[in-house]
């Protein structure tokens, strides 16, 4: 591809991300799957520019609002304008170079308009960061979340928000059904992939760079799965045992289901549930590759599906990895922060409460209910469990350090009742885990 063609592809990918509902990583996968003619090197260049725009969207928009000609109407092509601004403010291009790349040639962007030329001249040589930018622009988050995020992060607010602006590491989980960590490290080294053990998960490896993991033999064999260390810890803290009956209530694509199956050594029974039937059914390829044979996939009509009532008090462990704001995963999908509105958060809080109420019915006496989110906001985490406990006196909190000691071993990286993980402090996505025991 020519440089101009890569720019046009980035503009189109950004439009696809912002015009759809799928997270950026999934939207990018679909975008390139429909354009198999784009080679690996070009794909990396397009993705790099796309994510640079997504990670700096608030600052780019701030500069565009400041520099756009006052007398001109705003352009309807927001993503094209952001790419122009990113080339100048992030890549350090000169205005003439930008104009030369937007020349209207085959597969290349159409020429700059008069307003776009004026914008390019105004932004050339400017830094991306500016002392007049408010915190929500400087640290790239929605203004309406300023208070909740400060409450959640306290004195770590600046460090954590800066960490959320960066790129996430690539973590993999060793599939204990097929390998151990030492064997996986040897296999990766043989395929010229550098990795080292993660600090908290005994099954985790952190990969250097961005190797094409899906093309590796060690991946195709099912010995490893891509999974953030924080997500691995959620599965480990569910503390499943061989022979138990387990429900992964919001299983999604099945990442934690795979981890649970390995912990159970394929003994016992796991029911992977989700309201998105297509997604849960597509997990069959991953289950087969991993050698997980004790998993039943079940599509639910809602969290109140009659199946739940029919299987009340039948399971040793129920994992609820609840739908959430995803604020802990903004490193991976920076577009998600701009999709969230106050009304959306209110609806999520209600849905989380309903899911907890319903899933709790599945837990048998002496069993456990594990609640997890990839969110940072206390309203989605501690407050949800406190509310639940006010109306469910059969359940009580198991202090997370006790669960950690039994399920993982060693010292827990958290104090108090619950586990909170964050990018700056732990190097993981933002996660919350609370474990409740059913006593009667």
Image (cartoon, helix red, strand yellow):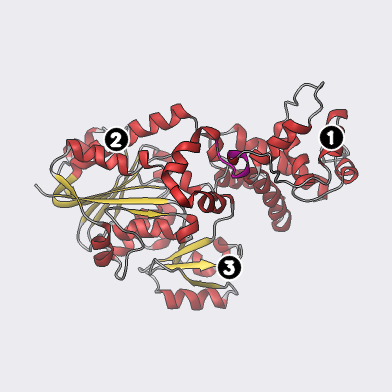
**Which element is circle 2 on?**
helix
**Which element is circle 3 on?**
loop
Q: Nearer the viewer, mark 3 or mark 1?
A: 3
Alpha-carbon distance for marks 1 and 2?
Answer: 50 Å
Q: Looking at the image, which is closer to me, 229 or 295?
A: 229
Residue bearing the label numbered 2: 353
Where residue 386 sits in the image (x, y, percent)? 25, 41
Residue bearing the label numbered 3: 208
Q: Looking at the image, which is closer to me, 124 or 158?
A: 158
Which residue is rendered at x = 83% and y = 32% of the image?
A: 116
Q: In screen coordinates, is 125 left or right of 270?
A: right
Alpha-carbon distance for marks 3 and 1?
Answer: 38 Å
Segment tinted magenta in the rendering: 136-142
Q: In screen coordinates, is 342 left or right of 385?
A: right
Instruction: Tell me if residue 241 comes above or below residue 322 in the rendering.
Output: below
Query: Badge 2, how many Cα within 10 Å: few under 14, some, many 20+?
Result: some
Q: Quadrant of residue 381?
A: top left
Query: How many marks do you count on the picture?
Result: 3
Residue farthest along the left direction in this orientation: 440
Residue bearing the label numbered 1: 110
């Amino acid at each position: 591809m020519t440089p101009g063609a890569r720019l046009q592809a980035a503009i189109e990918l950004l439009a696809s991300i912002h015009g759809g509902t799928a997270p950026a990583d999934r939207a990018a996968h679909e975008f390139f799957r429909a354009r198999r003619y784009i080679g690996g090197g070009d794909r990396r260049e397009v993705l790099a520019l796309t994510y640079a725009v997504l990670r700096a969207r608030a600052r780019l928009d701030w500069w565009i609002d400041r520099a756009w000609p006052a007398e001109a109407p705003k352009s309807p092509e927001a993503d094209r304008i952001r790419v122009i601004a990113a080339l100048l403010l992030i890549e350090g291009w000169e205005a003439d170079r930008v104009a030369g790349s937007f020349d209207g040639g085959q597969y290349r962007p159409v020429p700059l308009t008069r307003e776009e030329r004026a914008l390019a001249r105004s932004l050339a040589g400017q830094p991306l960061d500016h002392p007049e930018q408010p915190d929500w622009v400087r640290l790239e988050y929605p203004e309406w979340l300023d208070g909740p995020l400060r409450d959640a992060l306290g004195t770590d607010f600046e460090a954590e928000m800066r960490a959320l602006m960066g790129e996430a590491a690539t973590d993999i989980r060793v599939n204990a059904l097929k390998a151990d960590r030492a064997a996986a490290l040897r296999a990766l080294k043989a395929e010229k992939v550098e990795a080292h053990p993660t600090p908290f998960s005994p099954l985790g490896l952190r990969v250097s760079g961005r190797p094409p993991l899906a093309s590796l033999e060690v991946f195709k064999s099912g010995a490893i799965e891509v999974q953030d260390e924080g997500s691995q810890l959620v599965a480990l803290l569910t503390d499943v045992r061989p022979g138990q009956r387990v429900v992964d209530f919001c299983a999604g694509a099945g990442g934690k289901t795979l981890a649970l199956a390995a912990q159970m050594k394929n003994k016992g029974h796991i029911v992977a549930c989700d309201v998105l039937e297509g997604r849960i059914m597509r997990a069959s390829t991953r289950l087969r590759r991993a050698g997980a044979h004790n998993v039943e996939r079940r599509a639910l009509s809602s969290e109140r599906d009659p199946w739940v009532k029919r299987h009340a008090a039948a399971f040793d462990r129920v994992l609820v990895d609840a739908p959430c704001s995803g604020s802990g995963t903004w490193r991976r999908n920076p577009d998600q922060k701009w999709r969230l509105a106050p009304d959306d958060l209110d609806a999520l809080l209600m849905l989380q409460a309903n899911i907890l109420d319903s899933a709790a019915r599945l837990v048998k006496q002496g069993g456990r209910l594990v609640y997890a989110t990839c969110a940072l906001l206390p309203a989605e985490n501690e407050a949800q469990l406190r509310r639940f406990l006010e109306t469910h006196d059969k359940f009580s909190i198991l202090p997370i350090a006790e669960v950690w000691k039994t399920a993982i071993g060693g010292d827990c990286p958290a104090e108090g009742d619950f586990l909170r993980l964050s990018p700056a402090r732990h190097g993981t996505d933002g996660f919350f885990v609370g474990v409740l025991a059913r006593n009667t």
